[in-house]
Image (spheres, helix red, strand yellow):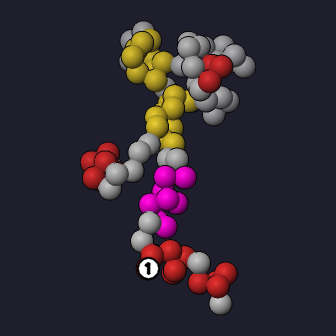
Amino acid sequence: AKKTLSALGMSYEKIHAFSNDCILYKKDYEDSTNCPTCGISRCKEGKDLILKEDVPAKVVWYFPLIPRFKRMFQSRKTAKSLTWHATS
């Protein structure tokens, strides 16, 4: 998926998330190591119950919409197809 996205010139952002979907570790929580709601660590535990510091428990891929819309409307033919309902 990464190669396909980069070949198309599309960007994405990986955001660490809490495994129970309580919060996203973004903005105010970016440097937090534990969930402020329940206190559980943001890292995965190994089979020996030791935390893996570099491995987040869950990662969400964020795809910004504005660059995608700009790319879609760069071609006049595509833009015409996308706006047919407003111009008819």
Quick check: 28 above or below 68?
above
Determine the residue positioned at 51% across, 28% down. Answer: 16
Quick check: 67 above or below 53?
below
Q: Among all residues in the image, which is located at the extreme right?
A: 37
Q: Is residue 51 magenta-colored?
A: no
Q: Is mark 1 on a helix, strand or loop?
A: helix
Residue 46 is left or right of residue 33, and the answer is left
Residue 46 is left or right of residue 3, and the answer is right
Residue 8: give x, y in percent of width and height: 32, 56
Q: Among all residues in the image, which is located at the extreme top?
A: 50
Residue 54: give x, y in percent of width and height: 39, 16
Magenta stretch bounds: 66-73
Residue 63: give x, y in percent of width and height: 50, 47
Q: Among all residues in the image, which is located at the extreme bottom?
A: 88
Residue 73: give x, y in percent of width and height: 49, 67
The residue type indicated by label 1 comes to Lys
Mark 1 is surrounded, within 10 Å at the Cα level, by few (under 14), some (14 to 19) or many (20 or more) other residues, namely few
- Reading the image, the residue beneath label 1 is 77
Quick check: 80 above or below 16?
below
Determine the residue positioned at 51% across, 42% down. Answer: 62
Determine the residue positioned at 52% across, 47% down. Answer: 64
Q: Can residue 40 be seen from the camera position used here? A: no
| Front residue of 10 and 83 | 83
Residue 21 is left or right of residue 74, and the answer is right
Determine the residue positioned at 63% across, 19% down. Answer: 29
